Amino acid sequence: MQLRFDGRFGFPGGLVEPGGESLEAGLRRELREELGPAAAALRIGPRNHRGAKAWPGGGAGSGSGGGLVTHFYIRRVELEELVAIERGAPRAPEHGLEVQGLVRVPLWGGLPVFLQHQFAGDAREQLLGTLPLLGIQPPQNEGPQTRGGNCQQGGGE
Amino acid sequence: MQLRFDGRFGFPGGLVEPGGESLEAGLRRELREELGPAAAALRIGPRNHRGAKAWPGGGAGSGSGGGLVTHFYIRRVELEELVAIERGAPRAPEHGLEVQGLVRVPLWGGLPVFLQHQFAGDAREQLLGTLPLLGIQPPQNEGPQTRGGNCQQGGGE
């Protein structure tokens, strides 16, 4: 996921250009702008489409006066592909502007805390809905155990 | 700042090795492990030291049974230095282990939301204490305006 200009976590993406740009072409363009060529080169097609959601109000900050429909794609990447994306991301055009950095979602114990961060739109729900599709059990994150305070850790390790 | 294995935001760092490792040598070693050689090559000395804090209990997860003292250093970097660090970070030994990614703290409007994330130790207070030293006015982040909901944004932009 990426940290956005507005301080929230989100997934790469954006609005398709008016005039017939396909969803996948728009996604590829946004990946290139936000993460660079290694991300834009990933093959992503209709089989990676995992759902759509209507936002009748358009969504604040969308720049759209009318309704908005968001589409969510999932693409499994190999570790080498991920590292290539991470290494290219700091030179992407939107790095330091829309995008403040790329992070790996911590899945070994850190997920309940990570889920307490601030997320854009329904990115948190998209993340939680994706984990079972990848064979990862979402944590029980509503209990008192995982809603602990901020200061359980001292300095770094 | 970096996202840590435990899902919290923090600053690079760690424990000095027993047996006489200096604070700055320990910091340099941790920078190399967590962010790679470009970060470890930064000149950081006693003039960059900006404070220390005692944690009598040692801090959970510190691996220390006794007391712990954390030291905080500030180093201003040029944009090219920062990009070099960002590009090298994905190959640092602890990337994908202790460190899940490096982010720029969003300072143009995104800071109040960013400050609502989860932080390790007193990293949030360290960040807030550093901003005035860099000539940045910390936001008023306790008012109702900036404590808004999670869903003010639709999809990406």
Image (cartoon, coloured by chain):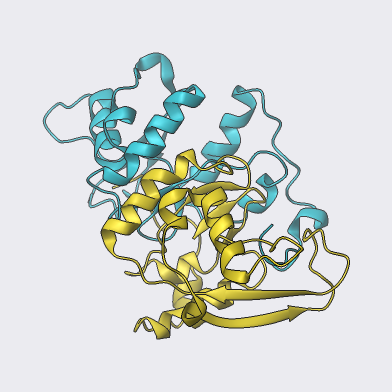
Chain colours: A cyan, B yellow
For the residue pair A133 and A82, the one nearer the viewer reads as A82
**Residue in the picture at 29% in, 41% down:** A14
Kindly identify the residue that appears in the image at 42 percent across and 25 percent down.
Answer: A81
Q: Position of residue A93 (x, y in %)?
A: 22, 45
**Res A51 seen here:** no
What is the x, y in percent for residue B139? 42, 80
- Answer with the quarter of the image where residue A16 lies: top left
> The C terminus of chain A lies in which quarter of the figure?
bottom right
**Extreme residue in the right direction:** B65
* Residue A29 against residue B88 in the figure, above or below: above
Is B71 left or right of A126, judged from the image as shown? right
Q: Is residue B144 left or right of residue B108?
A: right
* Residue at figure coordinates x 64%, y 27% from the top left: A132
Left/right of residue A4 with respect to residue A14 in the rendered view: right
What residue appears at the point 29 percent right and 42 percent down from the top-left corner?
A34
Say whether residue A153 is left or right of residue B8.
right
Locate residue A99, reporting x and y percent: 34, 51
Q: Is residue B18 visible?
A: yes
